[in-house]
Image: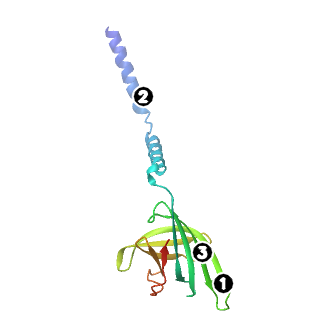
Amino acid sequence: MKKTLTLAAIVCLAAFAVSCGNKKRVEPAVAIEAYSDSIYMINDSTVGDLQTYVYEGVLPTDAGIPANYVLTINSYGLNADGTYSLTESYTETNGKVSTNYDEGQKIVMVGIPNDSTAVVYELVSYSNRPKMRLVAEGDSALHKVDKELKRVSQNVKHKLHRK
């Protein structure tokens, strides 16, 4: 009996020594678990459906010419990042009608001078056109603003209305 207990104690001590000397890191398994959790959250069905919002109206072009705009925004909510497509039509001084088409990413920012809660949509073109910034007026209208986030035009007619 004494031999069995002694042998069991030696085996136990040897197993303990081997386990202490072989320090395996468990962190990769934790990282993989965290990674898989984040993938689950991205694919979570509670995010919502892709929505399409269409705005139409007259805004001044970069050259100051009034133009008809049709802006289509695709995102998982009006105040979420997404994509856009934009059609701009205007009549040149020679009478020729020009139409430009652009598409890219819509990035949502919050805050402008004198209004920290204002929602700004920044349209970043896939074709490297200058960024366009629009301040939301509720969910019904958008106003074009410059780089300093000031309205480009004070004309009440110069805004896009949601359709």
Badge 1 vs badge 2, beta-carbon distance below 8 Å = no
Check disc 3 and report its element: helix, strand or loop.
strand
Direction from residue 120 to residue 89 in the image, left or right: right
Residue occupied by mark 1? 97
Q: Residues within 10 Å of mark 3 (few under 14, many from 20)?
A: some
Between 32 and 2, the one lying in front of the other is: 32
Please provide percent x and percent y for residue 51: 50, 61
Give the number of the disc on residue 109.
Answer: none
Q: Which mark is residue 87?
A: 3
Tell me if residue 46 can be seen.
yes
Secondary structure of residue under mark 1: strand
Residue at far bottom of view: 93
Mark toward the start of the polypeptide (3 vs 1) = 3
The circle drawn on residue 18 is 2
Q: Residue at x 59, y 78 (%)?
A: 88
Is residue 61 visible in the rendered image? The answer is no
**What amino acid does circle 1 point to?**
Val
**Extreme residue toward the left, this view:** 2
**Mark-to-mark CA distance, 3 and 1:** 13 Å
Tag 2's secondary structure?
helix
